[in-house]
Every structure is written in structure tokens, then in C-alpha cells.
Amino acid sequence: MKPRATESHELHFGYFFPSGKTNFLYSDEAARRAPEMTKDNLLALAQAAEAVGFDSLFIADNWSGHQRAAELAGHQSPAFHAPMLAMALFAATQHIGVISTFHTTHHKPAHIARMGATLDAFSEGRWGWNVVTGFSADEAALFGESFIEHDERYRMAAEFVDIVTALWTEHEPIDVEGKYYRARGRIKLPRPSQDPYPYLVSAGASPAGTDFASRYCDQLVALGNTVDVVSDTGHRLSDLTAQSGRDVGLCPFSMAIIREGEGEAEELYHRLLETLNVEATKEIAADVLGSIESSRAMYDKMGEEQATRAFGGAGSMLNFIGTAEQVTEQLLEVKSATDASTVLINFPLWSPDELKTFSPVLDHLREAGVWTPPESRDYSW
Ligand SMILES: Cc1cc2nc3c(=O)[nH]c(=O)nc-3n(C[C@H](O)[C@H](O)[C@H](O)COP(=O)(O)O)c2cc1C
């Protein structure tokens, strides 16, 4: 197990692992072209991401399946349960990190403490937890619960993570009588391999969400469709970490289409937009835009139809579209304008070959002195 990075001026890359045949670009052509979500295809994809030079795989997860048009067409569906998929990916890879999503709301701290310890110890320190509170009332209903108010979910998450980290690190039994959770005792071995405990990630964008990330996490995934939006989040995060004293990396979320010929990637992107599945996008947008302030804010000035199309065309995140040289320039601009330490990338036409289109970008970044292959570094994450 390698120690965490302390000071790194390099860029790192997370691969947004498919949690459905399409993610964030709800094109029927993309769904048709994507491989089936089978064991062989997903393991080959994880191995390709490792060989190309990604630092980590990020697996998103939600519970409830109420989006029927999306489900039917393969948009954000089907999705394997993230922590279970993570275990399989560890078995098929050597050094890449796997960040899997697990909800705080709806569960108990001992569940995640035990599961996370197993994932981290089994992988010898390669596991990260994307801590989410759940943004959907349907999900709460699935667990027979009412939907808890937004900021209270983060207060619950803070108490939840405090207990989980105590269960990971304390060798004597703990005795916690919190406002939301109680836990007495200790979990059995193994404990996590990472020191002091596994890598914690959050994508909270609200004041309560970024405050939570600044106090509990190692990385904040930032949603923003321009460098300025991401940079604003970075500034808010720096103000908060100045108070918390925690080192939290900024990780913009993005989509990439890279093709060799000038204009080819743009042409492909526009072709995918032509087959946007509007019904599926509306369902997903209603879920997300209905519940997430920061996403809704990006579409405030648009009518419903325009907002749906923008959302379904990966309009909430940075878009890296072009030749390898052009995408390299775009990434260097993001790095200098936002001080991002990691960039999380979704490839709408995912496959091992699609991931290989990123290799020349990494070669250029290496020449520019901002990237080295993860396996050659003496630090992780
Ligand atoms: C890249 C990314 C991935 C996310 N993955 C999940 C997920 O898998 N499950 C989930 O419930 N929420 C997920 N979210 C939502 C966040 O956890 C959070 O609810 C959202 O960003 C809004 O933050 P806020 O509630 O602080 O405004 C994700 C957000 C982003 C930007």
C-alpha cells in the first residue's frame, strides 16, 4: 500500500465507470453502441482503464428503478450495486483505485464500516467511498422511510461518517449515543489497509454539501459546465478547508470524446445529440433537477424543452471534445484555472477501445510535466 499524496502538482484521472449503458448523454445511438453490461465486458473495461493510466474508477449508485423509459432504452440502466461491483473489479486489476458509492441515509454505520474494511483490506488499500446522502424521495420510499430534509441529511451523514471512521480506527470498543445513530462495540478484523482510513469522496455542491466535504472528505467532485463554475466551487472549498484544516482535492466532473481528425469528435457529439432520448432524459432530469439545487441552477434561464436537451447532452459538466492535442490544451486550462488535482471523466461511447483514445492525451500531459503513470508513482490517489 502506497502513502497518500501530500504535495502533487500533477493531474490525476478518474474514470466514471458505466452505471448503465449510457450515463449523462442519453443518446439512443450511444446506448446501441455501448457493450452489454456483462461481467466480461466490465472487467475488460476496468483492465483497459488501468492499462491506459487512470488512477481510479468511480462507480455511482442509486437504488430505485422508477425511470421506465430510461430503463427500457438502457439510459443509466442496468447498474450493478456499486460495492459489489467494486469487489469484482479489484479481483481483475492490480493497482487502480475503485471508489464506490454508498448511501449514509437508509443504512447503519456498522454496515459500511464492515463492508468498507473488507473492500479496502482485500484490495490492499485501493478502495474509496463516495459518500452520498441520496437525493430522491423514491429511494427513501423504497426503504420505507420519508424523505429527510436536505441539510439534515448532511448532519446525519456527518454523524454517520464519525462512527464509521471510529469503527475503522479505534481498537477499543466505541460507545456512541448520537442524535441519529447509536453504536457500541467494535467490528471484527480486517480493518482497512489505508492510513488512517479509506479515501473519502463527496459530490455535495450545496453549502451544506461542500461544508460536509471540507470536514470529512479527501476529494470533492464538482459539477459545473464551465471552468468558471468549477473555479467558484474551488474557491468555496478553499475557504472552507482553511477553517477545517483538511486537505481536500478538487475534482471536476466531465465528459470526453476524442477523435484523431479535426472536427470528427464534434461531429460525433452532434450526431449523438440527434438521437437524444427525450422521454428518458425527462425522467432522469425530473429526478435530478427536481432534487439537486446546483444542477437546476445551471438551467434556470432555459425553458423546459431546452433544459432537458442541454441536461441530456452532458450539459451539466465540462466537455472535452476534440483531437488529443485540443483536449490536452483544454485540460491544461482547467488545471491552471481551477487548481484541480483530479479530473473525473465519463466516456459516452464506453469500451476498451474508446478509453484508449485518452492515451495520446496522457502522453502530451506527460511531455508537459503534469502527468506520470500511476504505477510509477510512490504515492496513491
Ligand atoms: C459526479 C457525481 C456523481 C454522483 N453520484 C451519485 C450517486 O452515485 N448516488 C447519489 O445518490 N448521488 C450522487 N451524486 C449526487 C451528489 O451526492 C449530491 O447529492 C449532488 O451533487 C448535490 O449536492 P447537494 O445535495 O449538496 O446540492 C453525484 C453527483 C455527482 C456530481
Image (spheres, rainbow, N blue to C red):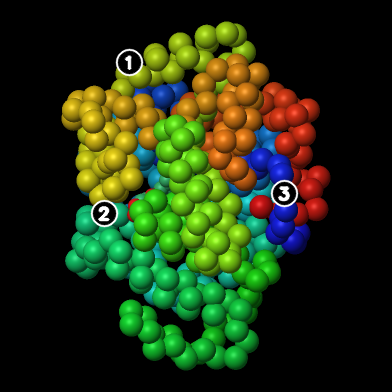
**Where residue 60 sits: x, y (%)?**
44, 49
Give the residue type that dot 2 points to. Ser
Mark 3 packing: few (<14 Cα in 10 Å), some, or many (20+)?
A: few
Q: Which residue is mark 3?
A: 8
Specify which label sits upstream in the sequence, 3 or 2: 3
Q: Relative to residue 232, is residue 336 drawn left or right?
A: right
Q: CA distance from mark 3 to mark 2?
A: 37 Å
**Where residue 20 sits: x, y (%)?**
41, 39
**Where residue 227 sits: x, y (%)?**
49, 33
Of circles 3 and 2, the one toward us is 3
The total of numbered circles placed on residues is 3
- Label 3 near ligand 1 (CB < 8 Å): no
**Where residue 313 sits: x, y (%)?**
36, 26
Q: Is residue 245 visible?
A: yes
Q: Please identify the residue farthest to the top as the structure is shown.
A: 262
Residue at (33% x, 57% y) in the render = 134
Mark 1 packing: few (<14 Cα in 10 Å), some, or many (20+)?
A: few
Give the residue type that dot 3 points to. Ser
Q: CA distance from mark 3 to mark 1?
A: 41 Å
Q: Which residue is mark 1?
A: 274
Residue at (41% x, 24% y) in the render = 30
Choose between 334 and 262: the one closer to the eye: 334
Q: In the structure shown, which secondary structural element does the residue marked by tag 2 occupy?
A: loop
Give the residue type that dot 1 points to. Glu
The numbered mark at residue 136 is: 2
Q: Is residue 58 visible?
A: no
Q: In the structure shown, which secondary structural element does the residue marked by tag 3 occupy?
A: loop
Specify which label sits upstream in the sequence, 3 or 1: 3
Are circles 3 and 1 on residues that touch, CB within 8 Å? no
Q: Relative to residue 281, is residue 101 drawn left or right?
A: right
In the rendered image, which quarter contains the N terminus? bottom right
